[in-house]
Amino acid sequence: MIPLRSGRGSLAFHAGGLRHPGGFGRERFTAYADVTHVAVGARALRIGTRHGVWPLPRAWFREPQQADGFVRTLYDRIAQEPTGAVQLARMAEIDQLLARRSGSWATRALAIACVAIFALQAWLGPVVHHAGFLNTRLVASGEPWRLVTANLLHFGSVHLALNVLGLLAIGAMVERAIGSARTLFVMGVAALGSTLAGVAMEYDALVGASGVVAGLVGALVFLEYRVPERLPASWRIPRGLLVTALAIDGVLGMIVPIIAGAAHVGGFAAGLVASALCIGPGLRREPLAPSLRVAVALVLAVAGASVLSGARLLAGGRAWEGHASRLLELDDAPVMILNDAAWLIATGRAPTRKALTEARELAERAVAGTERMDPNFLDTLAEVQFQTGDVDEALGTIDEAIALAPGVAYFEEQRRRFTGERAAQDRPEPPEPFWVEPERPELAPDDELEERRATEP
């Protein structure tokens, strides 16, 4: 028996196995035949078994040399088992796998792509988001590239940081084990699984690589429960921690509105299935089947074609004509998307006459959808009217916006542009925050009472 520091329990060698701390203050018995690998690190030992991985920090031992003595004794006990020679040979193979570290360029490349596109969003503005975000109606209308490009966009720096950290941390664990080609396949399938789940849930706006991260977690789960005996102990996460993290993510997805829970579930399930299709007992040393090579090439081709399709809108011009036409064909397009498309056409690079005509119809539908009570939508319509040469109509529309949001300098400066007091190309900076809340008209006492009655339980 090796007593550990106070409160940490002890390590005890028995005839058939080892008794050791098993988490949450409990002891666990592990048969010697179930030990798959022992990772010896500078700060901790990790005992890999067929049923999990158990960390033993060196700080738990009373004497530094006890940790190394424990490992030697454990190996001796395993050698005495009937299948001990085979077991130790397999552990030696795992040590070789651990020594031949492979790069994780696939997950790093995706992380770099996410960062680069986020920088592009900061440079070019909302047009990047509009060109690539996932909307169920837009996908159904003929813009399938959004199933891919939505995975590369992010709402803010915190959203980006969380997903990039997930890609780098979890992705590295998966990629080291199964190789870059299989990881690309898993990420590609997870990306589509995530966005297709978003389509099934009819999300109006979905972006982020969290579905891909969930797919990589699915690969981790497959590795942990399907081939644990092939994995170095240092590449494994304790099963209790893994299951707890999945449960927390599931609960957050149900109770936090901004988290796309269905997309996480879709990505996880797709990653799990993809792993089952491509991971063999040899892990990354397993030869790639011809069908898998074709599948990886297809993932790369679809990703490249999707990015190029979305990028066409960044160039402006005729590319917006098809997008606007598809929006106009939708009877239930959200007014925010109609408004955004109209604004981006009117303020974009070299809009065509047809695109401006379509933008006007989009803006008119958005304004009608808000019963002409939103100054932001009215501003968009006024901008389109100004760009099409209808200055008098633009002045009348911007005056409506000013009446709804008196005192907002932005709308006043827009009016000065339309009258010629300010250069036509000198568009004023939008207000902070960008979206102006319309003033709520004061209610007469009777109206106030009636509204209170309508809202009280």
Image: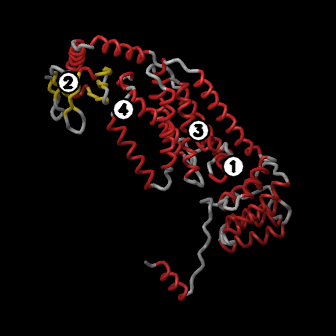
In this figure, which residue is indicated by the disc labeled 3?
A: 114
The crowd level at tag 3 (other Cα within 10 Å; few <14, some 14-19, many 20+) is: many
Front tag of 3 and 4: 4
Rounded to the nearest angstrom, the CA distance separating label 4 from label 2 is: 20 Å
Report, in whole angstroms, how far the alpha carbon at label 3 lies from the one at label 1.
Answer: 16 Å
User: Dot 4, crowdedness within 10 Å: few (<14), some or many (≥20)?
Assistant: some
What residue sits right under mark 4 in the picture? 237
Label 4: state its secondary structure. loop
Callouts 3 and 4 close, C-beta under 8 Å = no
In primary-sequence order, the first of circles 1 and 4 is 1
Dot 1: within a 10 Å radius of its alpha carbon, few (fewer than 14), some, or many (20 or more) residues? many
The first of marks 3 and 1 along the sequence is 3
Q: Nearer the viewer, mark 3 or mark 2?
A: 2
Q: Which residue is mark 2?
A: 18
Q: Quadrant of the C terminus?
A: bottom left
At a point 17% along the width and 30% down the height, the residue shown is 5
> How far apart in space, not on screen, are marks 3 and 2 (Cα)?
46 Å
Q: Residue furthest bottom?
A: 446
Q: Which mark is first along the chain, 1 or 2?
A: 2
Name the amino acid type tagged 3: Cys
Identify the coloring.
Answer: secondary structure
